[in-house]
Each structure stands twice: as structure tokens, then as C-alpha cells.
Image (spheres, helix red, strand yellow):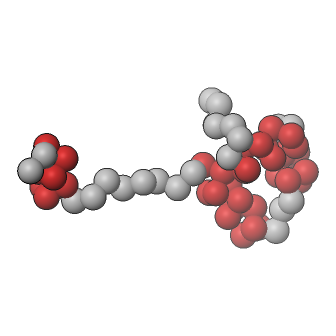
Amino acid sequence: MTINDIASDRVGPMWSPPYFGELIRESMDDVGWNVTETAARCSGECGMLSHLLKGKSGAIT
């Protein structure tokens, strides 16, 4: 038995949160916005938002 087995028994399997781009894409779909409109409303660039949605870059704060 390894330490990972013991930890898994005590706290359960690790939870993997969804990628940030997936959350944005779902929100865009909910309100009916495309990449251009979402970028404009968020004062961002279409290219950067597109990369974020495709998982090619991470969120920068």
C-alpha cells in the first residue's frame, strides 16, 4: 500500500476542475455570444480569447 492509496481512502479521488476555457465557452453559449462579441464585451482581443478557449493559453490576471 502506498501513501497515495492511503490518502485516496481518506479523502476520496482527487477532483479535477474544468479548464477555464470550457467555463467561458459554456457561458458564451448560454448567452449566445460569439468570440468577437465576448472579447469586445470583456475589453479583450479575439485572438487571445480564441487561444484561451482552445486550451492553448491560460488565464492571466
Percent position of residue 49, x then y: 79, 44
Q: Residue at x 64, y 37 (%)?
A: 58
With respect to residue 31, does 15 lie above or below? above
Q: Residue at x 71, y 41 (%)?
A: 56
The reply to whether residue 7 is visible in this rendering is: no
Q: Residue at x 13, y 46 (%)?
A: 2
From the viewer's perspective, tell me whether residue 19 is left or right of residue 4: right
With respect to residue 13, does 50 lie above or below? above
Decide which of 13, 37 is in the foreground and name it.
13
Quick one: which residue is furthest to the front in this view?
Answer: 1
Percent position of residue 35, x then y: 85, 53
Q: Quadrant of the C terminus?
A: top right
From the viewer's perspective, tell me whether residue 1 is left or right of residue 59: left
Percent position of residue 7, x then y: 16, 49
Q: Residue at x 62, y 57 (%)?
A: 23
Percent position of residue 15, x then y: 36, 55
From the viewer's perspective, tell me whether residue 2 is left or right of residue 18: left
With respect to residue 11, does 44 lie above or below? above
The reply to whether residue 18 is visible in this rendering is: yes
Quick one: which residue is furthest to the top in this view?
Answer: 61
From the viewer's perspective, tell me whether residue 36 is left or right of residue 51: right
**Number of numbered discs on residues:** 0
